[in-house]
Amino acid sequence: MALSVFSRMSRFVAVAVAAASLSACGVNSIPTAEENAKAKWADVQNQYQRRSDLIPNLVATVKGYAKQEQGTLVAVTEARAKATSVQVSPGDLTDPAKVAQYEQAQGALSQSLGRLLVSVEAYPDLKSNQNFLALQSQLEGTENRIAVARRDYNQAVQAYNTEIRTFPSIIGAKIIYGSKPMAPFQATTPGAETAPAVTF
């Protein structure tokens, strides 16, 4: 009887030790961190989609006032088309080249929008138009949301990459999951680190 209780007790301890050692190897924390990073990437894409959806309204509003800016309007439309054609799935987040291609397409769209908003300064009627002011406010809000979403994604990527590279989770990352580091979102637009000068 005592041996039976001892045998059960030793099995219980063995199971507890095995569970503890597996949890220490990142069995749960690695997928949790990976899914969090993927969810944050979805937020980034959602905010870019929101901006892309607003652009036709902005272009249509500006077109009515600024017929001379046809070249700028075409550039915005083309940049939007290119930005929406480049897609990065959650499985591509470990490929820095694909993430960089996505960043470049979105950066080109940001530059085109910037040129459009600067050219609008020459049209006082448009600047005072309520529709334009509402759309401009929506775009500014969207750019802020994009910045927050990219920051949150980068923080999630940092947590995931740290998790798969530190002991003891590195054991589970290599043996169980074959985890690879995810690519953070980086500014790829030349001069992005320098604030633009706004002149009137």
Image (spheres, grey):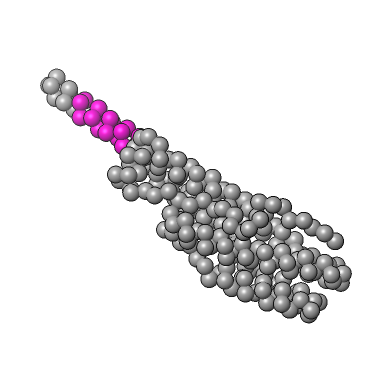
In the displayed structure, does residue 177 sit left or right of residue 86? Answer: left
Residue at 72 percent of width and 74 percent of height: 72
Residue at 50 percent of width and 58 percent of height: 99
The outermost residue toward the right is: 124
* Residue 46 shows up from this direction: no
Q: Which quadrant would residue 10 be assigned to in this image?
A: top left
Q: Which quadrant would residue 58 be assigned to in this image?
A: bottom right
Q: Which residues are magenta?
A: 9-24
Examine the rendered structure and indicate whether residue 116 appears above or below residue 162: below
Q: Is residue 12 magenta?
A: yes
Residue at 14 percent of width and 25 percent of height: 4
In the displayed structure, does residue 125 sit left or right of residue 9? Answer: right
Residue 109 picture location, percent across and down: 63, 66
Residue 14 picture location, percent across and down: 23, 30
Residue 84 picture location, percent across and down: 56, 69
Residue at 80 percent of width and 76 percent of height: 66
Instruction: Decide which of 108, 23 is in the foreground and name it.
Output: 108
Q: Which quadrant would residue 122 be assigned to in this image?
A: bottom right
Instruction: Decide which of 78, 3 is in the foreground and name it.
Output: 78
Predominant SS along the magenta part: helix
